Image: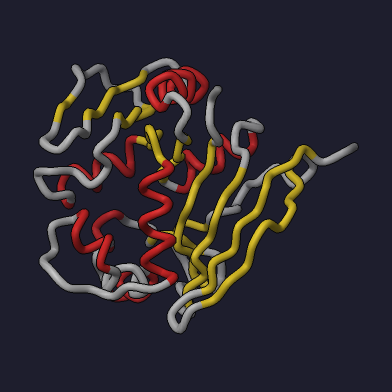
Amino acid sequence: MAGTVFFSVSMSLDGFIAPESTDELMGRQWMELQRWVFPQRFFRENLKLGGGGEEGRDNDIVRATFERTGASVMGKRMFDAGEEAWPEEAPFHTPVFVVTHEKRDPWERPGGTTFHFVNDGIESALDQAREAAGERDVRISGGGATILEHLNAGLVDEFSIALSPVLFGKGVRLFEGVDAERVALEQVRAESSPRVTHLTYAVRQRER
C-alpha cells in the first residue's frame, strides 16, 4: 500500500520558508530560520558536518522525517540550489524526482541518491515517487511553488512546519496563492523545544 504524501519545512513567524533569491541561501536570515536543525546529531551525520551534535526531541523529529521518506519530489529551483550546495553524497539516500522542463538522464550520487528528471508534470513525478517509495512515504521537498502546487491539487495528505522565531519581511511565502476554498486542515500535533515549535496538520478537502 502506498504511504503518506507529506512535506516538512521550517517557516518564519511571518510565513516565509526561503529568501527571494537563491543567492541568499546560507545568508543570515536563512541561517536563523534553520538554526534549530544544524546542531542536531542526525542532521550533522547525514550531511557529513562532523561528529557530535545534540540529541533530544528536535533530533528525533529530524531522524523520523528522514526514516519515513522512501522517495522525494522537488522543483527545479530547489534542485538547482541544492546541486551547488549539497555534498557529493547528497543527503536524501533515496530516489528524488525533479519536476522540470529540462531533459536529462538520471543523476546518480554516492550513498543511494538518484535524481530523476520528470518532464510531464507533478502527477507523473508523484506517481513515480510513490512506486519507488513502496510502503514508505513520499516527501514533497520543495521549493515553495512545488509544495503549493501539490497542495492545491489535493495531492498532500499531511504536513509539518517547524516554526522558527525569526521574521523575514519578504521572500518565498509558503501559503501565497493557496486554494483556501479547497484545503482544510486538522491539527495532529503541536510541540515546542527551546528553538522551534513543531506543528503537524492532516490535509482534508474542504466541504463546499
Name the residue rendered at 55%, 36% in the picture. Answer: 4
Q: Residue furthest right?
A: 208
Name the residue nearer the viewer: 18 or 36.
36
Name the residue rendered at 68%, 57% in the picture. Answer: 188
Name the residue rendered at 60%, 31% in the picture. Answer: 155
Q: Residue furthest bottom?
A: 194
Horizontally, is 84 left or right of 6 in the view?
left
On the image, the x and y values in percent for residue 51 come to: 12, 68
**Height in image: 71 above or below 52?**
above
Q: Quadrant of the C terminus?
A: top right
On the image, the x and y values in percent for residue 148 come to: 56, 42
Name the residue nearer the viewer: 112 or 25.
112
| Number of numbered discs | 0
Does the image show residue 29?
no
Horizontally, is 179 left or right of 134 in the view?
right
On the image, the x and y values in percent for residue 101 come to: 34, 22
Name the residue rendered at 15%, 27% in the picture. Answer: 108
Does the image show residue 94?
yes
Q: Quadrant of residue 63?
A: bottom left
Horizontally, is 75 left or right of 158 in the view?
left
Name the residue nearer the viewer: 207 or 112.
112
- Colour approach in the figure: secondary structure
Q: Quadrant of the N terminus?
A: top right
Q: Quadrant of residue 60?
A: bottom left
On the image, the x and y values in percent for residue 140 come to: 46, 40
